[in-house]
């Protein structure tokens, strides 16, 4: 990795390095957000299932 960075710095392509870092950070944020959304969806699904179980248990009253 240091060889790649020194090669990019020698050619003067620091803008490309900055754009790559920005894209990598954006992708990381997307992955983290998507993972949290999936966990929230699972928690909500569990809540709805438990609520349906509760309602079916006390439906006769």
Image: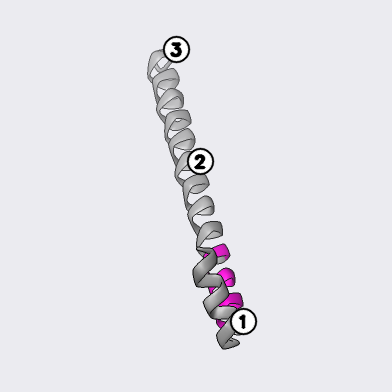
- Looking at marks 3 and 2 on the same chain, the residue that comes earlier in the sequence is marked by 2
Residue labelled with disc 3: 61
Residue labelled with disc 1: 14
Farthest residue to the bottom: give it: 12
Picture quadrant of residue 48: top left
Q: Nearer the viewer, residue 8 or 53?
A: 8
Q: Nearer the viewer, residue 37 or 29?
A: 29
Q: Nearer the viewer, residue 25 or 3?
A: 3
Position of residue 23 measured from the top left corner of the image (x, y, whole percent): 53, 71
Q: Is residue 19 magenta?
A: yes
Picture quadrant of residue 21: bottom right
Local SS, label 2: helix
Local SS, label 3: loop
- Looking at marks 2 and 1 on the same chain, the residue that comes earlier in the sequence is marked by 1
- Looking at marks 1 and 3 on the same chain, the residue that comes earlier in the sequence is marked by 1
Q: Residue at x 45, y 12 (%)?
A: 61
Q: Residue at x 48, y 39 (%)?
A: 39
The label number, if any, that marks residue 6 in the structure image: none
Mark 1–mark 3 contact, CB under 8 Å?
A: no
Q: Residue at x 59, y 71 (%)?
A: 22
Q: Is residue 1 above or below residue 4?
A: above
Picture quadrant of residue 41: top left
Q: Is residue 11 left or right of residue 56?
A: right
Magenta stretch secondary structure, dominant? helix
CA distance separating discs 3 and 2: 32 Å
Residue labelled with disc 2: 40
Q: Residue at x 57, y 74 (%)?
A: 6
Q: Which residues are magenta?
A: 16-25
CA distance separating discs 2 and 1: 39 Å
């Amino acid at each position: 990795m240091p060889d790649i960075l020194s090669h990019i710095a020698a050619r003067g392509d620091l803008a490309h390095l900055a754009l790559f870092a920005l894209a990598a950070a954006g992708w990381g944020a997307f992955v983290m957000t998507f993972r949290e959304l999936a966990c929230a969806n699972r928690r909500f699904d569990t809540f709805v299932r438990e609520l349906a179980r509760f309602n079916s248990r006390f439906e006769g009253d």
